[in-house]
Image (cartoon, grey):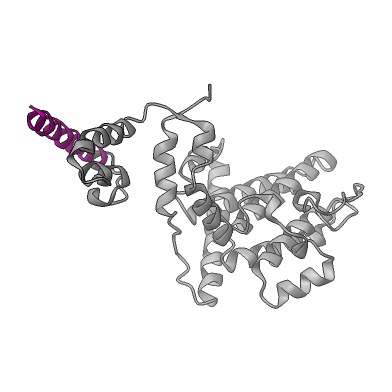
Amino acid sequence: MKIIIIFTFGVIVYFLFNVFIDTENQSGLMTKEPETSGIITEVLYPSNPDKSTVVEENKAAIARLDINCVKANEFYQNPKHLVLNAWDVNNFGFANINEVTSYYYSNEEDLVHAAEVGDERAMLILGVNYRWYTTMTSFQSVLIRPTELPRVKYQTKPYDRSIMEKSRYWLKQAALNNLLSGLGEISISYDREKEYLEKYSPENIESIQKARLMSLAFKKLFYAQSPEYFASSIQFLPKLETKQDQELFDKLFSATKVLWTEQRKALGYLGNEVLRPPVEFFELRKIQEHLCVDD
């Protein structure tokens, strides 16, 4: 009787296994061959070869296949996030602004020196600091102040276009040297310029419009570096209201993209590389589809 039960259960497991694989293949989300999937491997090759425990191990493994609800704390504690975080840091500069250490939060002279000798992270932080310094009296941006350092006292000052150009230069250098969030930070710099113009020069409609479109151009270029990673963000790029706006934007974006490609090629890159996220990104996205609220 025990042999019949085990055999019958084995047939059920085999059926569930094939249904699971067919479903995954149809969704296009399979990132591993079926025989190397952790859960499936456990079903087919239980850790304990003793036949008396095979059924129980199979039951436990199959239960884990049915992901109805994953608690938020379990999701965010998943070690796959560490891998994805490291990938973020390597390709974008920092995944979490708190990861900026005091080594990179020094005075302007030291940061400029580090950037000039090729420190990409110094380039990125120098650009963020200059963007802050454009309208603030303190060079050190509070946005990237390490927690171990005291708070910076600051006051506002009139917009300084020359400092903003320094900011964009170093942010672009960071991006060209593979810390791609520099492109996103340039987009933000045009947002800041637009906000200043709207407040202090509202009559300068042409400049306000150009700043808005340049922000969008750099944001689109940023997302284009890794379309899979930014798929959801791309969907929410703002739509332009008029045909004239769209034509102007197309010209600005085309010129921005051509210049980016040429500058990348000058550094020895192809110029049209697309950054693909690690497999952990797709696995976490699959799990996130089953995210629920903690009890």
Q: Is residue 22 left or right of residue 272?
A: left
Taking the spot 24% from the left edge, 44% from the top edge, the residue there is 46
Whole-percent x, y for residue 255 in the image: 55, 61
Q: Where 8 falls versus 83 (above or below)?
A: above
Q: Where 241 falls versus 263 (above or below)?
A: above
Residue toward you, 171 or 261 = 171
Residue toward you, 140 or 103 = 103
Q: Is residue 60 left or right of residue 187?
A: left
- Provide the residue span drawn in magenta: 1-24
Taking the spot 39% from the left edge, 39% from the top edge, the residue there is 286
Q: Is residue 127 left or right of residue 86?
A: right
Residue toward you, 99 or 231 = 99
Q: Main secondary structure of the magenta part?
A: helix
Taking the spot 47% from the left edge, 54% from the top edge, the residue there is 226
Whole-percent x, y for residue 163 in the image: 81, 61
Whole-percent x, y for residue 220 in the image: 54, 50
**Res. 256 visible in picture:** no
Taking the spot 65% from the left edge, 68% from the top edge, the residue there is 120
State the image quarter where residue 244 is shown: top right
Q: Can you say which quadrant of the picture contains the N terminus?
A: top left
Q: Where 73 falls versus 184 (above or below)?
A: above
In magenta stretch: residue 16: yes
Whole-percent x, y for residue 73 in the image: 54, 34
In magenta stretch: residue 49: no
Q: Where 162 falls versus 5 (above or below)?
A: below
